[in-house]
Amino acid sequence: MRKSPWVLVMFLVIGGLLGGVLGEILRVMAPQGTIQTIFSTNFTPGISPPLTIDLILVKLTLGFSLKISLLSLLGMFVGVYLYKNV
């Protein structure tokens, strides 16, 4: 049975979102210390500040940002694992 690449993308996105939510909960609920520091550290690649193109008639603003943490990466790996084994 051939699996669609869109299903893989869906598993990656859902795994990343659930990992990110879990990371935010852990950041708030965990006591100060090493565990909170490890799991609350994130990497934010993207376009900052957003690119703005002003064409007098139309003004376009383009930009994006990703907030990647250890738990969101772990959630993505779990999503790939579930995709391969389901």
Image (cartoon, grey):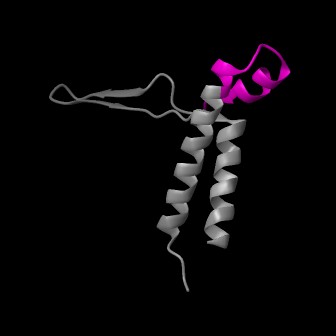
Looking at the image, residue 35 sits to the left or right of residue 24; the answer is: right
Residues rendered magenta in the picture: 26-44
Is 32 colored magenta in this rendering?
A: yes
Q: Is residue 74 left or right of residue 58?
A: right
Question: Which residue is located at x 18 percent, y 25 percent?
Answer: 56
In the rendered image, the vertical position of residue 83 relative to residue 34, given as above or below? below
Q: Which x, y percent locates residue 84? A: 66, 70
**Frontmost residue, 81 versus 50:** 81
Q: How many labels does the image show?
A: 0
Q: Can residue 41 be seen in this view?
A: no
Q: At 61% from the left edge and 27% from the top edge, which residue is drawn?
A: 25
As drawn, the residue found furthest toward the right would be: 34
At x 67%, y 71%, the residue is 85
The picture quadrant where one finds residue 82 is: bottom right
Q: x, y (%) of residue 10?
A: 49, 58
Q: Is residue 6 above or below residue 33?
A: below
Instruction: Name the spot of residue 58 as percent of width and height, x first.
Output: 19, 30
Residue 32 seen by the camera:
yes
Furthest residue toward top: 32
Q: Does the magenta stretch include residue 57?
A: no
Q: Which residue lies furthest to the bottom in this view?
A: 1
Instruction: Residue 26: name its quadrant.
Output: top right
Quadrant location, the N terminus: bottom right
Q: Which of 18 and 7 is in front in this view?
A: 18
For the C terminus, the quadrant is: bottom right
